[in-house]
Image (cartoon, rainbow, N blue to C red):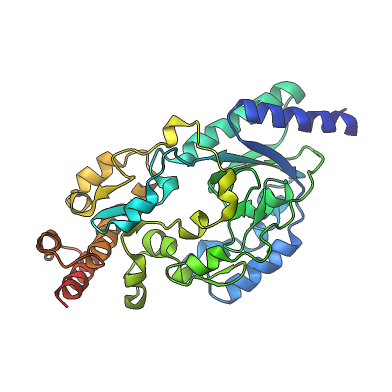
Amino acid sequence: MLQQSDFTALAEQIKQWGTTLGFQHVGIADTDLTIAEARLERWLAAGHHGEMAYMARHGLKRSRPAQLVPGTLSVISVRLDYLQADDQSAQVLADERLGFVSRYARGRDYHKLMRKRLQQLAARVELHVGDFGYRVFVDSAPVLEKPLAQKAGLGWQGKHSNLVARNGGCWFFLGEIYTDLPLPADRIERDHCGSCQACIDCCPSEAIVAPYQVDARRCISYLTIELEGSIPLALRAAIGNRIYGCDDCLAACPWNRFAQPTPESDLLPRNGLDGTALADLFAWSEADFLRRLEGSPIRRIGHLRWLRNIAVALGNGKPERSALQTLATRSSHPSELVREHVAWALRRLGE
């Protein structure tokens, strides 16, 4: 029978094993998410989740870990950085001919990478203590990963609602291990945003409706990734040349001055996703899309939404002959979704 002193030592050992496996920060949280649960319920009641019905589908399991995984007493929370060295995102956003892809999605799908390492971490714990109850999560179930990470001391939820780390800025992924081990919790990280509202001021679509409150229905990441149908007309111009996600609120955070480039080669850009001509991306057939984006998180939106997003980006560019010709290649596309956005882009350029 392990004593409390043994669990304290084990917690420190877990943190060491985690950093050895490549995580930049490992912390431990308890399962009390009362405050986060109330915030989630207000957000859902306001309809700010849009079409993301899964945010409400699981009842209280999202905010009560022991309901999702019976027996859960502690949560091991980890951080994996993904910032690329010599990032050229600002230059890509400034060039209307190029397509901007959110930094996190330019390389290999992080879900698989992190899940494998979390399993390796759990296996090391198992070797040390014997069989124990646990379950690994990386965006794969109803988990309030950001409040848990804050309770584990990894950072705080900034005014853009994403986690901010004092020694890492905003450029990182989160993952969790729910466990039945009574590990001592770390000290919660307090808020260090102060009077800064750079993330609020820079949002192209004014999706951050108040400090710490994001209306996903206006968020470009939601519009280009989560929304399955037509993008609202009033928000298309704000998308600019962003074809998958938007990093503006993250990039504006002054704490990014402490961020370090990732050592993970799997997270580095593939297929020119750090700045390829929109015309070239628009020419990809569905087979091209599936082949080139194998192992990429972008693949899940499918080829039709990929074309929808690029059509909007082309429509937000300069009315050059080449852009008109590029759009015309899809004007008779079998999908009504694609045709409608192409027609909008052609009208916009024509005006």
Horizontal and vertical percent position of residue 145: 62, 51
Seen from the viewer's position, the closer of residues 297 and 346 is 346
Horizontal and vertical percent position of residue 161: 59, 61
Horizontal and vertical percent position of residue 290: 27, 43
Q: Residue at x 33, y 38 (%)?
A: 270
* Residue 246 figure quarter: bottom left
* For residue 85, side relative to residue 159 (left or right): left
* For residue 134, side relative to residue 50 (left or right): right
* For residue 122, side relative to residue 322 (left or right): right
> In the orientation shown, which residue stands out farthest toward the top?
127
Q: Is any atom of residue 38 visible in this view? A: yes
Q: Residue at x 37, y 42 (%)?
A: 296
Number of marks in the image?
0
Seen from the viewer's position, the closer of residues 56 and 117 is 117
Q: Is residue 235 above or below residue 261?
A: below
Q: Is residue 98 above or below residue 172?
A: below
Seen from the viewer's position, the closer of residues 268 and 21 is 268
Q: Is residue 76 above or below residue 318?
A: above
Q: Is any atom of residue 143 visible in this view? A: no
Q: Is residue 33 above or below residue 182?
A: below
Seen from the viewer's position, the closer of residues 336 and 253 is 253
